[in-house]
Image: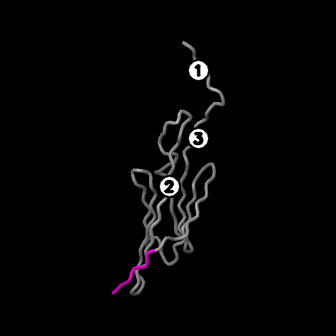
Amino acid sequence: MATAAARLPPVHVEEDDKQFTIIADVPGLGKNDIKVTITKDDWLIMSGKRKRGDEIIAFSERFKLPANIDYTGAQSPPCCLLRSIKAKVENGELTVIVPKTPSPVIPEVIEVPIE
């Protein structure tokens, strides 16, 4: 009988002006063992499973993709280029690159016309 060993891998998230980089430790798992998906409510889900002898190694991790908030306080489309997300597995690490959309230029002063 196989036993399941589910775990949450250590995950490191970095952010700069151009992208988010998400790195998860996934030792023993390869490209065909891992799945990266994005839900319609902007969750990036990383999961994987592999059977090794009688043991099943599995992991799952979620990352909420942020939305842009404009200067009016209204939420605009996601700040990420969802169709441009890339993932790779190398040396026991899953790296997911989430490119950001260019930030809109918000003027320091907005002149309001008087009627």
Q: Is residue 70 left or right of residue 54?
A: right
**Residue at position x 52%, y 42% in the image:** 68
User: Closer to the N terminus: mark 1 or mark 2?
Assistant: 2
Q: Few, some or many C-alpha atoms within 10 Å of disc 1 (few <14, some 14-19, many ≥20)? A: few
**How far across and down, in percent of the image, does residue 75 sit?**
48, 39
Give the mark, 1 or 3, whose residue is nearer the N terminus.
Answer: 3
Q: Residue 85, which numbered label?
A: 2
Q: Which residues are magenta?
A: 1-6
83 within the magenta span? no
Quadrant housing residue 91? bottom right
Q: Dividing the image into 4 quarters, which one contains the C terminus?
A: top right
The overriding secondary structure of the stretch rendered in magenta is: strand
| Residue density around tag 3, few if under 14, some if 14–19, many if 20 or more, within 10 Å | few
Percent across and percent down for residue 28 are 50, 78
Residue type at mark 3 is Ser
Tag 2's secondary structure? loop
Q: Nearer the viewer, mark 2 or mark 3?
A: 3
Mark 1 element type? loop
For the residues carrying marks 1 and 3, which lies nearer the camera in this image?
Answer: 1
- Residue at the far left in the pictured view: 1
Q: Which kind of residue does numbered mark 2 sit on?
A: Ile
Comparing 72 with 36, the one in front is 72
Mark 1 belongs to which amino acid? Val
Secondary structure under tag 3 reads loop
**Pointer 1 residue:** 112
Percent coordinates x, y for residue 83 in the rendering: 46, 51
Q: Which residue is mark 3?
A: 103
Calculate the distance from the C-alpha at mark 2 to the C-alpha at mark 3.
Answer: 18 Å
Image quadrant containing the N terminus: bottom left
* Alpha-carbon span between mark 1 and mark 3: 23 Å
Look at 55% across and 48% down and name the residue there.
Answer: 100
